[in-house]
Image: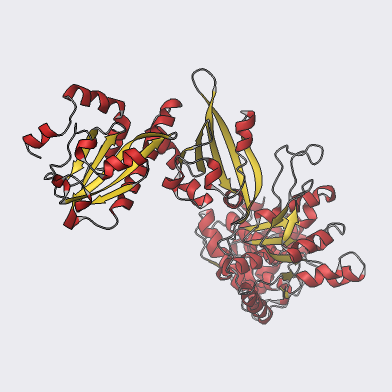
Amino acid sequence: MDGKIKEKFLTVSYKELEERKSQYASYISNLKDIFSSFSKDTPLTVSFVDKDGVVLFTVGNSEDSTIFEGLVFDERLGNTAIGKALQTGVPCEVKGREHTNPKFFEWSCSAVPIYEKDNLIGVIGVSTRLQDYPPFTIELAKLIASSVTKQVLLDSALKEMNISKKFIQVFAEGNKDGVLILDKNANVVYINSVGASILRINQQEAIGRNVTEIVDFTPVILEVFRTHKGYIDREFIIESPSRGTLHFIKTAVVLRDENGEFAGVVDFFKEIEKVRKFVTSFIGAEARFTFEDIKGRSQKFVEAMRIAKIAAHSNASVLITGETGTGKEMFAQAIHFESARNKGPFVAINCSAIPQELAESEFFGYEGGSFTDADRKGRTGKFELANGGTLFLDEVGDLPLSLQPKILRALEDKVITRVGGTKSIKIDVRVIAATNKNLEELVNQNLFRRDLYYRLNVIQINIPPLRERKEDIEVLAMHFLERLSKSLGKEVKGYDKSFIEPLLNYSFPGNVRELQNIIERAIITADSDTLTAQHLPKEIFKQENPDLNFPDYSFDEMRKNLVIKVLFETNFNITNASKKLGISRPTLYKLIRKYNINITQHL
């Protein structure tokens, strides 16, 4: 606009312009932030005009001479979008010859009013030449006005609470929980991206709105606004019309101003699923073993593995039977690890180790104050901890009879209720049970519910004892030798016949677990890189009616094994051993040297 046009239109003095700018500094500052990288080559001009019609800020088209800082939009300018928006208080649009002033015939403009607590503050205008005017201009103006309003509201609220905007953003966005900051009127000052994701709302659109407007349920945080009292780690189950049951752990911190007056609330919240995952991770509730870790080649073992791999690709309940030490939990973990639930927790519970009076709360959890000595915050049960994963019921034959119908109901209905509670909690749990007892006999003796037995025994896996899979002993022995040698820092590379043959003729009442213990002990006591019979515990040679036929042994090897056996039986007492062998002490010493038997570690 040239000098004559400026003289014709009303303008304010430089001093008044600066005073007005200071009154609206927050709006101008936020507009500058938004358009800091706005190109001067753009055909658009964005302006901020105060409620009196004074242009306080413009940015954009450097060739636009129709609007400038200090210009006053009054009746002299005729029909304009900015003037109409100031008069009517609603968004307006004026294009080309809709203007009454010929100077604006080549221009079009959209204007959107800005309000603060129902009071008109001013107008955001977006203008350009008629031929460059896009159809979405008024929507763009609305978006700019909304963004500026929310940012100013945030700045104002943070200033009122004496909190730095930058600090709030860094603190909230760096928090793994949802963080919702509310002013004293329960308006959203800030919500971090985690919180917006949990509540499934738009982060930017939530700022400036009342908390009751951003969710479709009654926010429990409103109780804090009524009482002005916060809380720590309180559990809430909320019904949302759009999302169903929401389960949160929440902490509410009351904010107060310098005079001690209530100024707002910071609400920390996280979904119970994340809490469960953290707890199960903290207590090691995850599967460590895979099918690759389970060794064996016997026919019975191979059949057990075949069924286990089928079970892994099913969601059906599994019952694993076998003697103590056969590896039932390893099979359970491998099934979980191979299943579609492997991202969820693997929670194990030994049914024989739980006191009967605490069994129900252990499985289902309890509400605070449900019984004497109960944690006042309540506690999560194993079913909830295993949600989305697998619950392993070890020694299930020892499950208290009184608890069995409740376990059955949880498995069938997929819903539990905590002890002392009234709300139903949905669960998604796959159960794998294991026992060394004959459950069918327990059912016949009325010590185990028949319906629960059928519910658990959809897929049955029987793990044979080690004495019935002799061909697996050497496979397992070498596996344990290689693995344990590394972990124990010993360079033991193998074993000779004198070491393995007694093991092949041993009945292994402790099964695989006992064999692992024997190998570990042998590695620890070994003084060479090869294990021999002298590294075996004497219990191996004391077994009743042992099968001591060594068809592949030479006479010399048989004599060596006999000497070692008698030395173990006599606790390496040379006098007693020589008497039992029917030879003299010097002769026994010669045999010990000949066969390189190390007796010093046993004396």
Q: Which residue lies furthest to the left in this view?
A: 3
Between 220 and 359, the residue placed more toward the observer is 220
Between 92 and 434, the residue placed more toward the observer is 92
Instruction: For residue 6, say whether it is visible.
Output: yes
Left or right: where 194 falls relative to 552: left
- Residue occupying the point 79% across, 60% down: 407
Residue 147 occupies quadrant: top left
Left or right: where 368 falls relative to 489: right
- Residue occupying the point 70% across, 45% down: 379
Residue 269 occupies quadrant: top right
Q: Position of residue 278 (x, y in %)?
A: 57, 49
Q: Position of residue 124 (x, y in %)?
A: 29, 41
Q: Which residue lies furthest to the top in this view?
A: 259
Q: Where is residue 450 in the image (x, y as percent from the top left)?
A: 86, 70
When the figure is inspected, residue 200 is found, relative to residue 555, above or below; the finding is above
When the figure is inspected, residue 303 is found, relative to residue 361, above or below; the finding is below
How many numbered circles are shown? 0
- Residue occupying the point 66% across, 66% down: 332
The structure's colour scheme is secondary structure
Quarter of the image for the N terminus: give it.
top left
Between 71 and 395, the residue placed more toward the observer is 71
Q: Residue furthest right?
A: 445
Between 116 and 34, the residue placed more toward the observer is 116
Q: Position of residue 323 (x, y in %)?
A: 76, 67
Instruction: For residue 584, say whether it is visible.
Output: no
